[in-house]
Amino acid sequence: MNDDAYDISHLLESDWVKIDVPERQMAKAPPAAPRQSAVAAAQEAMAQELLMVAEVHEELIKQYLRISDGASEDPFWQ
């Protein structure tokens, strides 16, 4: 291999260039609340719906049990 290809002496001998970079301003407002992803929003909506129908479901079960208990006492029920 050619040693000249790995020679970086010209880089070490060169003058360094200084670049003026403005100071970064800090944001004074608090960060915005993270947005809810579409999946999380759908899961939350589904959970709310399930909670709403849970009571109806429970009442339907109780009604079924009352009807089936009453029907079993009926002499014509088979």
Image: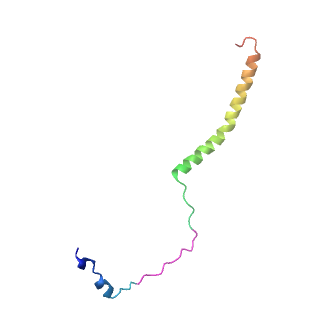
Relative horizontal placement of residue 29, taking residue 1 as reference (left or right):
right
> Observer-nearest residue: 4 or 34?
4
Relative horizontal placement of residue 20, taking residue 69 as reference (left or right):
left
Secondary structure mostly taken by the magenta-highlighted segment of the chain? loop
Establish if 17 lies above or below 30: below
Q: Is residue 25 magenta?
A: yes
Q: Quadrant of residue 78?
A: top right
Residue at image location 74% in from the left, 25% down from the top = 66
Residue at image location 73% in from the left, 18% down from the top = 71
Residue at image location 41% in from the left, 84% down from the top = 20
Image quadrant occupied by the N terminus: bottom left
Q: Position of residue 27 (x, y in %)?
A: 54, 74
Q: Quadrant of residue 63?
A: top right
Establish if 5 lies above or below 34: below
Q: Residue furthest right?
A: 73
What's drawn in magenta, residue-wise?
Answer: 20-30
> Observer-nearest residue: 46 or 18?
18
Q: Is residue 32 magenta?
A: no
Establish if 15 lies above or below 64: below
Relative horizontal placement of residue 36, taking residue 60 as reference (left or right):
left
Q: Position of residue 19 (x, y in %)?
A: 39, 84
Q: Position of residue 12 (x, y in %)?
A: 33, 85
